[in-house]
Image (spheres, rainbow, N blue to C red):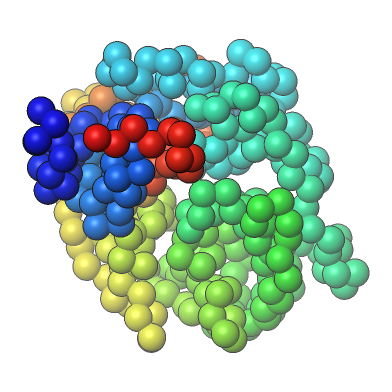
Amino acid sequence: MAAVIGVDDLLREILLRLDFPAFLVRAALVSKRWLALAAHPAFLRRFRDRHPPRLLGFYYHDACSPRPQFVPVSEAPELHTAVSRAGFDDCDPSVGPFGCHNGRLLLKPDQFAHGKYVVRSPLCPMRGLVPVSPPPLPEYLRGYGYSECFLSRDSSDGIVFVYLVLIDRKLSLQVSVLQSGSWGECILAEGHLPLRFHNVWMEMVAHGKLYMRTDSAYIYMLDFVAPCPRFVTIKLPDEVGGNYKLSSADDGGFFLIHGEGFQLSLWHHETDDNGQDNWELVDRFCVRVAHDRCEEILVLGAGDNAEFVFLGLQESRSIICVNLRSRKETVYKVKVGLFWYVSVFPFMTVWPPIFPALKEEDDHDE
């Protein structure tokens, strides 16, 4: 055995067959050599391809109901402890979820009030609730717009706070990024919309870009990490109406998941220097459960890389989780009022894994 695990190539293949990232972290505790192999970027890419992040469950919040709910999904015994920590039993019943990403849950104690958010880490309950105070606003923006807070998809602890003001066709944005407990220098951007939109909603932050949906056939995007922040207008595919959600893609682009009747369509948009109309239809199929029940689907939420989507069925008060790779459908009965006011946030295993720093006395290599 010592001869086998003493060979790096063989040890990599053994580590690659571990089922969960948590097991990889435990293996890395053996020695600095094991840690170096497990934490190497090339190995982690192979591990993720073989073991993509698992869906532990999902949070759903009905704006007409005072308390959000958690629905466990994973039945793996190894993940039972993680799943059991994810509920709201120890939280104020008035909190509302505003985002969930990479093991962190963004909450707001009163969803209709301005003020602090809190971040909860259900997989690490010893961290408690971490308050997040919004950055200061310029005087000229106060009282004219609305704000959103996002968990960053580009870092393990980042938070992005955006304040939006729309007057006629002039759009003003202030973007602030929280890293290691401190707000960075705010980014101010202004642009003129090509059309007059009555409403603009902030949908997603990914790869240093803010995506906004409108009440017309356009998505508006702000690249706020560019040397000179710039706006891009993206026209939706002709077949797409308003019933859709966006999902970030690893290639820097994004997916759009659209529902119409019983049918689900998956589109991919690759962002380039022009940012215009680079759409590819990836898949289109009929949702079997919706067809059998003669109920139209409402797209409620989606996972990263368009791996799965959550759909609502109003009459049967059900949420369907559809795996977009296998098309497997799983139905969950829920207690909601109107699905138009329901938000769904998937709760995933953490990726990439967080490895410990080993001291000399902890090195148990052969």
Give me the residue at 63% from left, 83% from top: 192
Vertical arrangement, residue 352 with respect to residue 184, above or below: above
Q: Nearer the viewer, residue 218 or 361?
A: 361
- The reply to whether residue 88 is visible in this rendering is yes
Quarter of the image where one finds residue 34: top left
Horizontal relation, residue 273 to residue 340: left or right? left
Q: Position of residue 167 (x, y in %)?
A: 74, 73
Horizontal relation, residue 58 to residue 157: left or right? left
Q: Position of residue 104 (x, y in %)?
A: 54, 38
What count of labels does the image hold?
A: 0
Give me the residue at 65% from left, 61% from top: 177
Horizontal relation, residue 100 to residue 55: left or right? right
- Locate the C terminus by quadrant: top left
Q: Position of residue 25 (x, y in %)?
A: 36, 35
Give me the residue at 77% from left, 52% from top: 134
Quarter of the image where one finds residue 20: top left
Which residue appears farthest toward the right when viewing the image?
139
Q: Position of residue 304 (x, y in %)?
A: 36, 49
Vertical arrangement, residue 343 with respect to residue 203, above or below: above
- The reply to whether residue 356 is visible in this rendering is no
Give me the residue at 71% from left, 51% from top: 181
Quarter of the image where one finds residue 115: top right
Q: Nearer the viewer, residue 356 or 180?
A: 356
Horizontal relation, residue 110 to residue 90: left or right? right
- Locate the N terminus by quadrant: top left
